[in-house]
Image: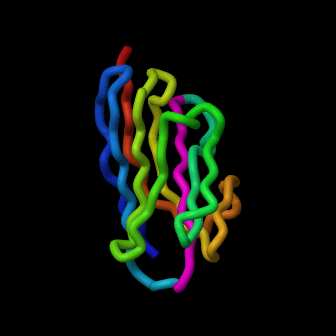
Amino acid sequence: VQLQASGGGLVQAGGSLRLSCTASGRPFSDYAMGWFRQALGKEREFVASIGWTGGPIYYTDSVKGRFTISRDNAKNTVYLQMNSLKPEDTAVYSCAFRKGKLPGTWEWEHDYWGQGTLVTVSS
């Protein structure tokens, strides 16, 4: 499985970005997807995840109400809509693939990872 993430960039605080991650390669009948991020000098952390059917959905507390994860299974793509961005959201965002229908929130639960896309939020 190959994962291709895109959509990162530079945005001012309060702005919005939408990240996309498309899965290709060996098909699986069911898979969940997640987004993680890693800020400079910090450990990678969970951001959001979504199950095969579009639910359940999980968010880390710091992004609830601001970020929305969604997916389009026909396009093998998961999205992360990020609104009201803050400087502390600055990080490299990576998408992750988890076999099975249910989403995870831990790194070890995910089987494949995409390359990161950098999100920079200026104050």
In reply to whether residue 34 is colored magenta, the answer given is yes
> In the image, is 68 to the left or to the right of 76?
right
Q: Residue at x 64, y 63 (%)?
A: 103
Q: Residue at x 42, y 28 (%)?
A: 85
Q: Quadrant of the C terminus?
A: top left
- Residue 41 occupies quadrant: top right
What predominant SS class does the magenta segment belong to?
strand
Q: Position of residue 106 (x, y in %)?
A: 70, 54
In the displayed structure, would residue 97 be above or below residue 34?
below
Q: Residue at x 52, y 33 (%)?
A: 39
40 or 119: which is nearer to us? 119
Q: Position of residue 75 (x, y in %)?
A: 34, 72
Q: Residue furthest top?
A: 123
> In the image, is 62 to the left or to the right of 13?
right
- Residue 20 occupies quadrant: bottom left
Q: Residue at x 55, y 57 (%)?
A: 34
Q: How many marks?
A: 0
78 or 66: which is nearer to us? 66
In reply to whether residue 13 is colored magenta, the answer given is no
Question: What colour-coding does the image apply?
Answer: rainbow
Residue stretch in magenta: 29-40
In the displayed structure, would residue 90 be above or below residue 6?
above
58 or 122: which is nearer to us? 58
In the displayed structure, would residue 31 be above or below residue 11?
below
Q: Position of residue 109 (x, y in %)?
A: 69, 63
Q: Position of residue 93 (x, y in %)?
A: 46, 45
> In the image, is 77 to the left or to the right of 96?
left
